């Protein structure tokens, strides 16, 4: 199951990287970044809720005392990181925002060390450095770093922190025996509520009502780049440490770069090629070691037990 979990996370990163296939068309319709975030969230929330109502209503049941987990994934993570990311672009530049966003795997590694007692190894450290360097090269983020402001740095680090917090709060929810479907559903119900205040609803309605092709495009964006990858990533966390999962998911900018080169005929520089090689090499190094010890959620993967694995203090497995 561990190997297939890595595949789930890898596929999630690849699907996240495909977002450019949809966003360019929506941007051409004058939809802003937060408008698109809201559309992804509302499509996911509606789709997941309808699915669970039809096939497994029990998974819609959560305890009120656990709502903080979903407020964490929905607001502290997705809504917060998107808000900070686009504010950083405005305050500084896309380059600065990209570099600081990819501090997320390092933040996940540090938080997971203290919160879940995940081991910090040399192999992880090497993979982390290579992943960060690769993402910087792939996105061309070194260009324009001279345009840095204190406000931009603050927003940028906020984006990195928010991006990292999805893994953290999802782990808490998984350890409370919530199914990945439940986590994804409530995450995006809360995200859609939080982001509606930052969107131009009139413009969104105008675009959606323009034609059926736009409706299908938005639905595809929600399913392909949100519903499926977030489900896969959350399901992968059942067996994979947060720190490793965040590194594996860094295949996202590599996918986006390759799609840009193949589909949109964007020029792939030598710096970009080097970045692709670094990220792929980091994934191989990170995944060549064993020893992840995480809690197994039977609701997510069926009747699987590992009684020999002890729980750490506080109820989390290491």
Image: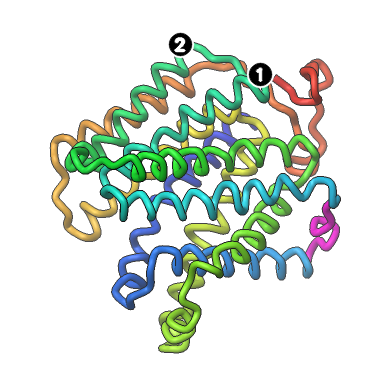
Q: Point out residue 38 in the picture as x, y percentages from the top left corner.
A: 52, 66
Residue tagged 2: 122
Q: Residue furthest top?
A: 122
Compare residues 120 and 309 and report the one nearer the observer. Answer: 120
Question: Which mark, by number, is residue 117?
Answer: 1
| Magenta stretch encompasses residue 56 | yes
Q: Secondary structure at mark 1?
A: loop
| Magenta stretch encompasses residue 294 | no
Callout 2: 10 Å neighbours few (<14), some, many (20+)? few
Viewer-side label of 2, 1: 1
Q: Point out residue 295 in the picture as x, y percentages from the top left corner.
A: 74, 28
Q: Point out residue 308 in the picture as x, y percentages from the top left corner.
A: 81, 16
Among the 4 quarters of the image, the one containing residue 140: top left
Callout 1: 10 Å neighbours few (<14), some, many (20+)? some
Among the 4 quarters of the image, the one containing residue 28: bottom left
Residue 102 visible, this orientation: yes
Compare residues 182 and 111 and report the one nearer the observer. Answer: 111
């Amino acid at each position: 199951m561990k190997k297939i979990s890595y595949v789930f996370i890898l596929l999630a990163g690849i699907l996240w990287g495909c977002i450019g296939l949809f966003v360019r068309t929506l941007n051409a319709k004058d939809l802003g970044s937060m408008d698109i975030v809201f559309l992804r969230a509302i499509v996911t929330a509606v789709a997941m809720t309808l699915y669970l109502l039809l096939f497994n209503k029990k998974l819609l049941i959560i305890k009120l005392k656990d709502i903080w987990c979903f407020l964490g994934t929905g607001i502290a993570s997705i809504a917060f990181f998107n808000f900070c990311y686009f504010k950083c672009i405005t305050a500084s530049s896309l380059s600065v925002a990209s570099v600081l966003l990819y501090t997320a795997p390092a933040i996940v590694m540090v938080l997971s060390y203290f919160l879940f007692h995940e081991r910090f190894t040399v192999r992880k450290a090497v993979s982390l450095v290579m992943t960060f360097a690769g993402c910087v090269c792939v996105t061309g983020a070194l260009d324009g770093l001279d345009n840095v402001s204190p406000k931009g740095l603050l927003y940028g680090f906020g984006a990195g922190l928010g991006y990292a917090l999805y893994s953290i709060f999802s782990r808490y929810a998984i350890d409370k025996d919530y199914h990945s479907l439940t986590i994804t559903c409530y995450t995006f119900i809360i995200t859609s509520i939080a982001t509606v205040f930052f969107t131009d609803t009139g413009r969104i309605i105008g675009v959606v009502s323009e034609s059926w092709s736009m409706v299908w495009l938005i639905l595809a964006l929600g399913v392909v780049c949100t519903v499926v990858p977030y489900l896969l990533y959350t399901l992968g966390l059942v067996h994979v440490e947060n720190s490793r999962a965040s590194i594996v998911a860094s295949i996202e900018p590599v996918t986006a770069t390759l799609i840009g080169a193949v589909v949109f005929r964007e020029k792939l520089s030598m710096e970009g090629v080097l970045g692709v090689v670094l990220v792929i090499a980091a994934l191989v190094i990170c995944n060549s070691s064993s020893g992840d010890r995480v809690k197994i959620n039977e609701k997510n993967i069926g009747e699987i037990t590992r009684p020999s694995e002890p729980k750490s203090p506080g109820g989390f497995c290491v």
